[in-house]
Amino acid sequence: MKFKMLLVSLFSVGFLFSQELTIYSHRHYDTDKGIFKLFSDETGIKINVVQAKANELAKRLEVEGKNSKADLFMTADAGNLEQVRVNDLFVPVTSKTLDELSPKELRGKDNTWYAFTTRARIIVASKDRVKDGAIKTYEDLTKPEWKGKVLVRSSNNVYNISLLSSMIDSIGEEKAREWASGIVKNLARTPKGADRDQVRAIYAKEGDVAISNSYYLGHLANSKNEKDVEAFNSVKVIFPNQDDRGTHINVSGIGVLKTSKNKEVAVRFIEFMLSPKAQEMLTNQNYEYPVNKSVKPNKLLQSWGEFKIEKPNFEAYYGNAKESLKIFDEVQWK
Ligand SMILES: [Fe+2]
């Protein structure tokens, strides 16, 4: 009898220690490594991360099919999360904890994925060269007075694809095309670099106004590179469209994959991502907006004040993506 009990307990200890999670992630931020480590330290559950571009990961999931070792898919764009949902790779998840921590409007349909942060696609403008109130909307960037002054990254980037896709949804395809075409007419240079590079280009006087995700401003402000801090200090933050539909937001989110053999542990990890500890790391180290209401945004974000958010229709972020790419191509947004 004793021997049997010993065997059982040895088996359960072994089981606990052998638990691990495989996460397919397109997130490219150092903060995530710290979060994974903290989760492993607290639970003894090992985390394997496969990091690649979202479309590569989606392709890999498709090829691996039922044999995939992936438990979770996480990324920094709702369009990519929606692609995985539409391809029926996520399993709906219900959890009392998640119901408490996650706002309903920041989830995928049928609780297939959960946002763990939000980020705003803001306008950044030169403090010296752009008067207060001169630019209030995304549409203002297409006015003739900004010819040769607008900076934005390439159209193959998901943040721009989701921005245009949500515009198609909110203002219609024709106006969205006009907008994209107007931006191209006003470009200071052929799109290149990432969001931070657009802010750096304002500082270098290559242009006066840029589109960027909000958290990159936090990274510039807190950079070890003096020039980046100066670039941050040379610009002001504008939350677009406050008098009408609100500022476009995107999310970082995560969902459990159908192939997961560790679904309970996978859900536990999502709960951890929404816990105050992880949420504080996400806002204070990566300057994203927490979704857990008990956690205050980082001080810099607080200094920008509250802003009106455009009610996100995440299904359109992926649903209109093909149309967006077509428009970008037509208007020659490189
Ligand atoms: Fe990013």
Image (spheres, grey):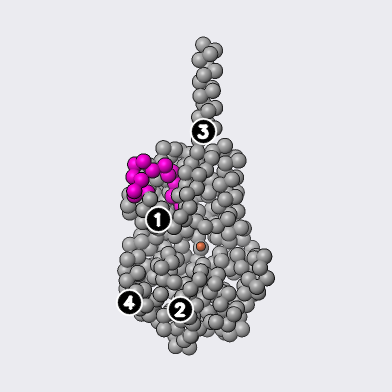
Q: Which amino acid does label 1 sit on?
A: Glu
> Image quadrant of residue 127?
bottom right
Q: Marks 3/1: CA distance? A: 28 Å
Residue that badge 2 annotates: 190
Position of residue 278 measured from the top left corner of the image (x, y, whole percent): 57, 50
Position of residue 249 measured from the top left corner of the image (x, y, whole percent): 47, 65
Q: Which dot, 3 or 1, sits closer to the camera?
A: 1
Q: Which residue is drawn at 50% across and 71% down?
A: 193
Residue that badge 1 annotates: 56
Q: Earlier in the sequence, mark 3 or mark 4?
A: 3
Count of numbered labels shown in the rendering: 4
Q: What residue type is labelled 4?
A: Glu
Position of residue 265 measured from the top left corner of the image (x, y, whole percent): 48, 39
Q: Is residue 181 above or below residue 283?
A: below
Question: Do the CB atoms of the residues marked 4 and 2 lie less than 8 Å apart?
Answer: no
Q: Nearer the viewer, residue 101 or 287?
A: 287
Q: Which of marks 1 and 2 is nearer the N terminus?
A: 1
* Left or right, 43 with reference to 108: right
Residue that badge 4 annotates: 330
* Left or right, 19 with reference to 314: right
Residue that badge 3 annotates: 18
Q: Marks 4/2: CA distance? A: 15 Å
Disc 2 is placed on an element classified as loop
Span highlighted in magenta in the image: 61-74
Q: Earlier in the sequence, mark 1 or mark 4?
A: 1
